[in-house]
Image (cartoon, rainbow, N blue to C red):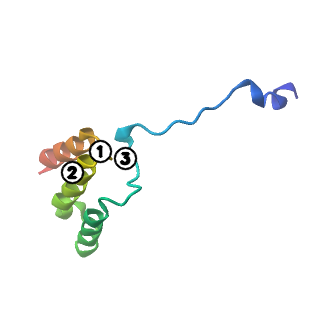
């Protein structure tokens, strides 16, 4: 019973996600690239390999505007070269 009343003993301090955790594009600066990528996915039957170039353009847009880090683009391009 005593453990149920000890909520104040631990405090939780929220913190924003790391920059590499794919933060939201709150200002919609890259929404045109995102829409092009989504349109490509729809037309290709959601085959992501067919839309790789558009995905890279979207990630580059996010990097240019400091929304994402280079690690996201590197992981995507490394996977693209590894799998053809």
In this rendering, position of residue 16 left or right of residue 43: right
Frontmost residue, 63 versus 39: 63
Residue 64 shown left or right of residue 5 in the figure: left
- Residue that numbered label 2 is attached to: 60
Q: Which residue is located at x 80 percent, y 27 percent?
A: 6
* Mark 1 touches mark 3? (CB < 8 Å): no
Considering every residue shown, the one lying at the far right of the view is 1
The residue that appears at 17% across and 64% down in the rendered structure is 50
Determine the CA span between mark 2 and mark 1: 10 Å
Label 2 near label 3: C-beta < 8 Å? Answer: no
Compared across the picture, whether 21 is left or right of 58 comes to right
Question: Is residue 1 positioned above or below 77 on the image?
Answer: above
Residue at position x 23%, y 42% in the image: 75
Circle nearer the N terminus (3, 2): 3
Depth check: 4 or 8 in front?
A: 8
Residue for badge 3:
22
Q: Residue furthest bottom?
A: 43
């Amino acid at each position: 019973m005593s453990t149920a009343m000890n909520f104040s003993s631990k405090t939780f301090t929220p913190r924003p996600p790391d920059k590499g955790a794919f933060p939201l594009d709150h200002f919609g600066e890259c929404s045109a690239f995102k829409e092009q990528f989504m349109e490509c996915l729809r037309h290709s039957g959601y085959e992501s390999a067919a839309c790789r170039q558009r995905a890279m353009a979207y990630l580059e847009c996010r990097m240019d505007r400091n929304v994402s880090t280079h690690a996201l683009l590197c992981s995507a391009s490394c996977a693209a070269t590894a799998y053809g």
